[in-house]
Structure formats: structure tokens, C-alpha cells
Amino acid sequence: MTASRTDTVHTPPPATARPGRAVTLLGAATALACLAFAAVNIAFESTGDFLDGTDYAAYADGFTVMNWLVVALKLAGAATALLSIHPRPRPRAVPAVALALWGAFATLGVYALGSLTQAITMAATDTDRIDAAGTAYVLGFLLAATGFGILAAAWSRRHHLNRRLALLGALAAPAVLGTVLLAAPAILAALGMLPAA
């Protein structure tokens, strides 16, 4: 007795066993970059003097909360990058990793493009405000976004995933950026832990 037509139509092709060497190296490098970015925030927090002598010294607790929120996001990014090069992930985790990868790509991409637009505007009006540190900051986010984009595409191709997951993941960008740039500061300002905008 032959298999029915529906049995064969809905059977997905098997995933490739392992990511390629280039993707593996990129995943490791992206994870290390996220950890390095997190280390910068941790260093700021450990010194405890990055607000000393400024008008914001009274809001140190609020800036601490924001700092650790950013650290958590960067550590989540590092974990996502490492998961993207796992040779044999659990089947149930595959869609979740895809969503996280596309979400990281979209979030970093939108933020980097916004920062780049701001830098171009500043360069057109006041070139003295553009320095090496600011340029490296924007380039770092552009490279991180590119890395997550490649990892997301490779993961989706390797596991034969539907493009709708990429779209759903991209919807994370406004949610994450809205939380970090708008909602969290607004809540902290309402509590008196940050200056009102």
C-alpha cells in the first residue's frame, strides 16, 4: 500500500546537520562582540563614577537600572548568536531561535540606521561633534546588525523555515527599542529616578 499524497507533501526536508565553517566563525565572533559591548556597560557600572561631577549624579540609580537592562539585552544577543551555530538544536527551539535572530537583526539595524542618520545630520551642521568614538559606535552596531542578519538567513535556510518568521521577528524591533528608549526611561522618570524629558 503506497503512502498518501498528503503524507509526502507536508513532510519538510531534513535540516543540514551543521552550519558551515564561515557561519560558525561569524556566530562566535558576533557572540564575542555582544559580550564585549556588555563588558563596557559593566565597566561603567563597576567604576561608579561615570556620572560624578555631572548634572545627572542625583539620578545614578535610574541610570544603573538602564545600564543593566542594556547588559541583559547584550547577553541575550550573545546567547542567540551561539544558539545559531548549535549543530543539532531541539526541533521545538528552531522557530524561537529564528525569531530571536531576526529580531536582533531588525533591532540593531533600525538603531544603527537611526544613529547613522543622526551622525550624518550632525556632520552636515557641526563637524566638531563627530569623533572617532562616535564613529566606532555606529560602525559597531552596523557590523553587529550585519552579523545577525547573516546568521538569521543561514539559520532559516538551514532549517527550511517560512519567511513569515522573519517578518514576525522583525516586529521585535519597535517593541525592544520602544522599551529601552521610551517606556523604561518614562517609568523611571515617573518614579523620580531619571530626569523628566
Image: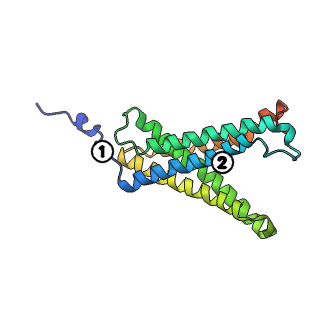
Q: Position of residue 22 (x, y in %)?
A: 39, 56
Within the image, what quadrant is residue 142 found in?
bottom right
Q: Identify the residue at horizontal 56%, vertical 53% (top origin).
A: 145
As drawn, the label of residue 17 is 1
Q: Residues within 10 Å of mark 1 (few under 14, many from 20)?
A: few
Position of residue 49 relative to residue 144, above or below, is above
Q: Amino acid at mark 2?
A: Val
> How many labels were placed on the picture?
2
Q: Amino acid at mark 1?
A: Ala
Between 44 and 125, the one lying in front of the other is 44
Which residue is disc 2 drawn over?
40
Q: CA distance from mark 1 to mark 2?
A: 36 Å
Q: Tag 1's secondary structure?
A: loop
The reply, left or right, for residue 146 in relation to residue 20 is: right
Q: Position of residue 182 (x, y in %)?
A: 74, 41
Q: Residue furthest left?
A: 1
Q: Identify the residue at horizontal 50%, vertical 40% (top origin).
A: 79
Between 168 and 9, the one lying in front of the other is 168
| Quadrant the N terminus occupies | top left
As drawn, the label of residue 167 is none
The reply, left or right, for residue 17 in relation to residue 47 is: left
Q: Position of residue 82 (x, y in %)?
A: 46, 43
Residue 74 visible in rendering? yes
Position of residue 185 relative to residue 28, above or below, is above
Within the image, what quadrant is residue 3 found in?
top left
Q: Position of residue 10 (x, y in %)?
A: 29, 37
